Image (cartoon, grey):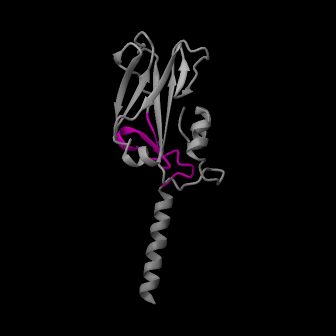
Amino acid sequence: MKTKLSILTVLAVSTILMLSGCAKDGRNGTNGTNGLDGNANVIYSPWYTPTAWSGTSGDWYFDISNSAISHDIVEGGVILAYVSLPGDIYDKAVRPIPAYALGCNWDYLIPYYGKIEFLCDAVNMPGTSNYFFRFILIPANTALKSTTGNKYPSAEELRKMSYIEICKKFGIPE
């Protein structure tokens, strides 16, 4: 009986310590993998500006290496990517990728685990100044609940949400 009571006490104290170390809404979490910020198992990158584009006319790309783009994320999670471009018809627009803007298509691909490539099919090489790209990684096993108590939407529903809706849902700074 004493052993059972001791085990229950240890479990209760451990649970309290784990819960007390977390912010109620997840906004004050610790840094995630490779300097990315994490929030309730959701990882978001900083905004990247390409220093240079590789490729040729109609097939431009730049890549970012990051170990957070893991097998589990790629094969079972959700990867969301966004772009903000200078001269977009919408002032300071953040578009979900894939997108069509400035007369060309913008997309991304995962050539292998640990790397994301942002793509553009422009005839001329895209610029680098004020071109911003970001990705958000949502693990498949995210069992946490949103602030409304509902489970997170499906991958399809997440991809239909606006950038602002995604940021609000996961507490990501815009």
- Number of marks in the image? 0
The residue segment tinted magenta is: 22-45
Q: Is residue 8 magenta?
A: no
Identify the image quadrant of residue 36: top left
Please say if 124 is above or below 137: above
Please say if 55 is above or below 76: above
Residue that lies at the very extreme toward the top in this rendered image: 124
Identify the image quadrant of residue 101: top right
Residue that lies at the very extreme toward the right in this rendered image: 148
Quadrant (top left, top right, bottom left, bottom right) of the C terminus: top right
Q: Which residue is drawn at 52% across and 51% down?
A: 23
Q: Does the magenta stretch include residue 36?
A: yes
Say whether residue 35 is left or right of residue 27. left
Please say if 75 is above or below 3: above
Q: Position of residue 122 (x, y in %)?
A: 45, 14
Give whichever of 114, 109 is nearer the camera: 109
Q: Where is residue 62 in the image (x, y as percent from the top left)?
A: 36, 24
Residue that lies at the very extreme toward the front in this rendered image: 58
Please say if 116 is above or below 138: above
Q: Where is residue 78 in the image (x, y as percent from the top left)?
A: 49, 43
Q: Position of residue 46 (x, y in %)?
A: 44, 32
Give whichever of 9, 100 is nearer the camera: 100
User: Mostly what secondary structure, the magenta segment?
Assistant: loop
Q: Residue at x 56, y 26 (%)?
A: 95
Q: Which residue is drawn at 52% across and 44% down?
A: 27
